[in-house]
Image (cartoon, rainbow, N blue to C red):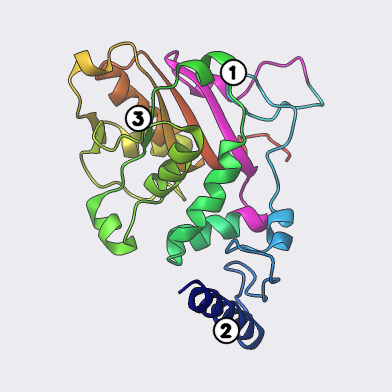
Amino acid sequence: MERAALTAARWHRAASALFDLLLPAACAVCWRARAGHERELVCGACWLRARELPRPRCDRCGHPINLARPSAPCVWCPLLPPYVRAVRSAYAMPGGAAESIVHAFKYDGWHALGAAMARRMAALRFPPDVERERAALVPVPLASSRRRERGYNQSEVLAEGLARLWNLPMRTDLLARTRATTTQTRLTPGERQRNVANAFRSLADRGSLRGCHLVLVDDVVTTAATLNACAAALHDGGARIVSFVTFGRAPALGDRW
């Protein structure tokens, strides 16, 4: 029995090696053949071309500090309501391989990319009080029509990966989208806020969320309009404080990175 199992395993390895030789797996971004040791769907070269969010970063909002004016007030913190404790993002967007990774993840059906993206997000360090207090991860809800079209909620895929790595529960039962909204991509900051105003509501009773520190998860943040709308719903529903984590972040007005 053991010899038969060993022989089967050897044949499987040989067949896999032959398959990789004849039909090498392609990178989901650049479509070049991945090296045999590369098990992620994005090749190492593309990950190297993804620009990490520049450092140093603001301790609260995680936005890059303008080194030309290091003592100037943070331009991003004023976007956040007082009950949002901290925000962290892994990569700079738009442009570069990070944007291509997000595009493949959201629009080309590569939902399995979420595991590798979540691993990079999990390496982000928050202030000690956030890491000590965070009670659950809450993905930004997707409109049902868009979920049917895409087949999955990309924020939920990221939150699921983070939940395993941070050993936290993922809660999809705390927040709901009350209406579909226009895509935020081409909207001005003011239009973004109006677009998502009252678009989310808390599903939990206030007692169950009282005192909780929740972490909202999304793929990309630009003006934080969507995340702020979600945070407002959770705060109104009883959450004491909220933090955000995203894979990518777009520059604020005046940024030069």
Query: Residue at the location (22% across, 43% down)?
Result: 179
The label on residue 219 is none
**Which image quarter is the N terminus in?**
bottom left
Q: Which of label 3 and label 2 is nearer to you?
A: 2
The amino acid beneath tag 2 is: Ala
Percent of width and height locating residue 48: 74, 55
The amino acid on which the numbered mark 1 sits, given as a three-letter code, is Pro
> Circles 3 and 1: CB distance less than 8 Å?
no
User: To which residue does mark 1 refer?
Assistant: 127
State which quadrant residue 95 falls in: bottom right
Does the stretch in magenta take in 73?
yes
- In the image shown, does 208 or 5 lie closer to the viewer? 5
Which residue is pictured at 73% across the width and 36% down the height? 54
Q: Where's residue 245, x and y in %? A: 50, 34
SS at badge 1: loop
- On residue 229, the disc is 3
Name the residue tied to disc 2.
15
Q: Is residue 119 visible?
A: yes
Q: In this view, does 89 lie to the left or right of 238?
A: right
- Please name which of the two marks, 2 or 1, marks the residue nearer to the observer: 2
Label 2 residue SS: helix
Few, some or many residues within 10 Å of mark 3 (<14, 14–19, 20+): some
Q: Extreme right residue here? A: 68
The percent coordinates of residue 58 (x first, y second) are: 66, 22
Quadrant holding the C terminus: top right
Among the two numbered marks 2 and 1 on one chain, the one whose residue lies closer to the N terminus = 2
Q: What stretch is highlighted in magenta?
A: 70-98
Depth check, front residue: 152 or 136: 136
The local secondary structure at tag 3 comes to: helix
